[in-house]
Amino acid sequence: MNEERQSGPADVKRRIIEEATRLFGTQGFDGTSIQAIADAVGIRKPSLLYHFASKEALREAAVESLLIHWKNELPGLLTAHISGYDRFSSSLTAAVEFFLEDTNRARLTVREMLDRPETAHARMKEHLSPWTTLLTDYIRMGQESGTIKADVDPASYIIQVMVMVIGTVAIGDIVAALVLPGGGDSMEAKVSELVRICRESLFSSPRKPA
């Protein structure tokens, strides 16, 4: 196809991963064919298989791209601020914005957790455990200084926040339709409330600590 010839290999590969993320997230891995992904990208099936030898290889690449993003993103977020409050706020805001930018990222993450829990756990541990460990250390430091509530369990808190963020984005449209008149453009409001709940359940003071 002309579009395929005009695009560079890196751009084609990126678009393949984007469409695979969308289709795997909305239809599931088993419900998505290689041909459907190729059609969505606008290339021939052999061209897709040139970049990814199988549907399973493409699945791995799509999931890996999500985890590598956070592996690369978290260090900068955690070192850009001095206070634990700012580290928390910037990390949570970045997570929400990343999944809102493409809600299929959240849907794919949920599907992987449900369909392949052991694989998902192993991959997250491999890529993210050094940084989640650092976050738990920050929470403990905040508890020692009195800025974070003493009864918060750091590891459980981080897990719950991850589930809340990913789950809220993944099913946000459904929830909005159920609880808000007409559904509407309420996702931003719901996300803002989510951030507020997460923040106030962690820090001792509802205002920003000094």
Image (tube, rainbow, N blue to C red):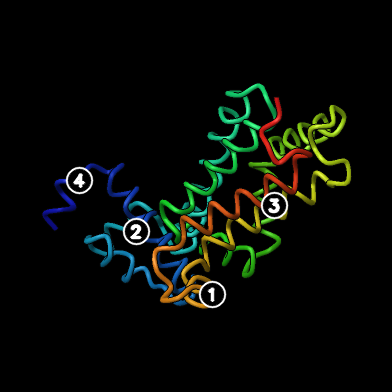
Instruction: Please name whichever residue, 27 or 59, is drawn nearer the observer in this view of the structure.
Output: 27
Q: Which residue corresponds to mark 4?
A: 7
- Measuring from the top left, give residue 55's x and y in whole percent: 44, 64
Q: Which residue corresponds to mark 2?
A: 49
- Which is closer to the viewer, label 2 or label 4? 4
Residue at image position (26%, 67%) is 39
Task: Name the amino acid type tagged 3.
Answer: Ala
- Which is closer to the viewer, label 3 or label 1? 1
Tell me which label, 2 or 4, sits earlier in the chain. 4
- Measuring from the top left, give residue 4's x and y in whole percent: 18, 52
- Measuring from the top left, give residue 145's x and y in whole percent: 84, 27
Task: Give how far apart the Cα atoms at labels 3 and 1 are.
Answer: 36 Å
Q: Which residue corresponds to mark 3?
A: 122
Task: Name the amino acid type tagged 2.
Answer: Leu
Q: Dot 3 surroundings within 10 Å: few (below 14), some, or many (20 or more)?
A: few
Q: Is residue 209 above or below residue 99?
A: above
- Please tell me whether mark 2 sits on a helix, a strand or a loop: helix
Placement of the C terminus among the 4 image quadrants? top right
Marks 3/4 in contact by CB < 8 Å: the verdict is: no
Q: Quadrant of residue 184?
A: bottom left
